């Protein structure tokens, strides 16, 4: 169970505001990552005793959930992609609008790598992620391709996997391949130039162009 799944009764009259906890958690997670993030460190950053946090949090996972949604809510690029701000055109390219949303999320995850692992642990249910999910499913439904939710899962998995492996993808061209063990791979690898975002965009284009993409995704889930 995550932070957003529970009804909370605040016992302390001077308890810390969840927004303050969220902002401090994002800052610490960006600095130290998940491995270096502790409730004791969060309490120190907020200038309170660790016990004070338990009026708002049940544990470390709650702080992760708050940070996850706060980071997304503050991302201007994601907000623009969700709201369609600054776009003169009407919704004439459904697949293009889906890719725009997916690539905005991908770039957001590269800015906050710890968020990838929080998303992989449990479904996000904060207001910012619900708004993103709603817009993604709405755009996919408008495109008329089978089950929009199943296709949204496929798009999300592509984004998460691409963000997780982006670092390795950048070093792929310079990591040697044994010619004897994998001759075909080695021959193509020698002339490879990998742009992780371009690879993701090509994969999204292929997925969204498939005539039965939504139905296929629904069948396999």
Image (cartoon, rainbow, N blue to C red):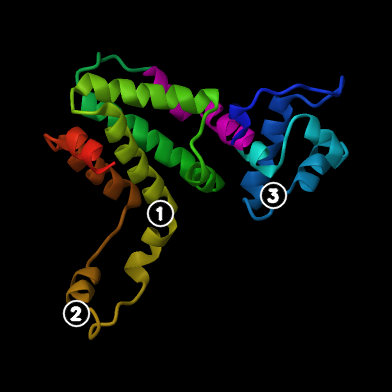
* Residue 47 visible somewhere in the drawing: no
Q: Which residue does the numbered mark 2 point to in the structure image?
A: 183
Give the magenta-colored segment's residue range.
65-85
* Residue 3 visible somewhere in the drawing: yes
Nearest to the observer: residue 100 or residue 41: 41
Mark 2–mark 3 Cα distance, whole angstroms, equals: 44 Å
In screen coordinates, is 12 left or right of 88?
right
Q: Is residue 66 magenta?
A: yes
Residue depicted at 68% across the width and 32% down the height: 23
Q: Which residue does the numbered mark 3 point to in the structure image?
A: 37
- Number of residues whose C-alpha sits closer than 10 Å to that of mark 1, classed few (under 14), some (14–19) or many (20 or more): some
Residue 206, placed above or below residue 104: below
Mark 3–mark 1 Cα distance, whole angstroms, equals: 23 Å
Q: Main secondary structure of the magenta part?
A: helix
- Number of residues whose C-alpha sits closer than 10 Å to that of mark 2, classed few (under 14), some (14–19) or many (20 or more): few
Residue 139: x and y in percent read: 29, 22
Please identify the quarter of the rendering in which residue 156 is found. Answer: top left
Q: Which residue does the numbered mark 1 point to in the structure image?
A: 166
Q: Secondary structure at mark 1?
A: helix
Residue depicted at 40% across the width and 18% down the height: 83
């Amino acid at each position: 169970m995550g932070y957003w799944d529970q009804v909370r009764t605040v016992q302390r009259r001077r308890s810390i505001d969840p927004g303050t906890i969220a902002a401090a958690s994002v800052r610490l997670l960006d600095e130290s990552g998940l491995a270096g993030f502790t409730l004791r460190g969060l309490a120190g950053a907020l200038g309170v005793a660790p016990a004070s946090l338990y009026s708002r949090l049940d544990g470390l996972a709650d702080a992760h959930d708050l940070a996850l949604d706060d980071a997304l809510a503050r991302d201007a690029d994601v907000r623009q992609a969700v709201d369609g701000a600054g776009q003169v055109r009407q919704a004439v390219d459904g697949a293009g609008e889906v890719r725009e949303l997916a690539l905005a999320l991908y770039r957001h995850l590269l800015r906050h790598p710890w968020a990838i692992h929080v998303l992989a642990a449990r479904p996000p249910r904060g207001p910012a992620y619900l708004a993103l999910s709603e817009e993604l499913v709405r755009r996919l439904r408008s495109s008329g391709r089978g089950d929009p939710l199943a296709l949204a899962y496929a798009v999300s998995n592509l984004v998460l996997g691409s963000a997780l492996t982006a670092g390795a993808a950048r070093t792929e061209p310079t990591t040697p391949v044994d010619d004897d063990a994998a001759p075909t791979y080695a021959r193509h690898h020698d002339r490879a130039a990998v742009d992780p975002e371009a690879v993701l965009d090509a994969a999204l284009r292929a997925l969204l162009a498939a005539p039965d993409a939504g139905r296929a995704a629904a069948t396999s889930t």
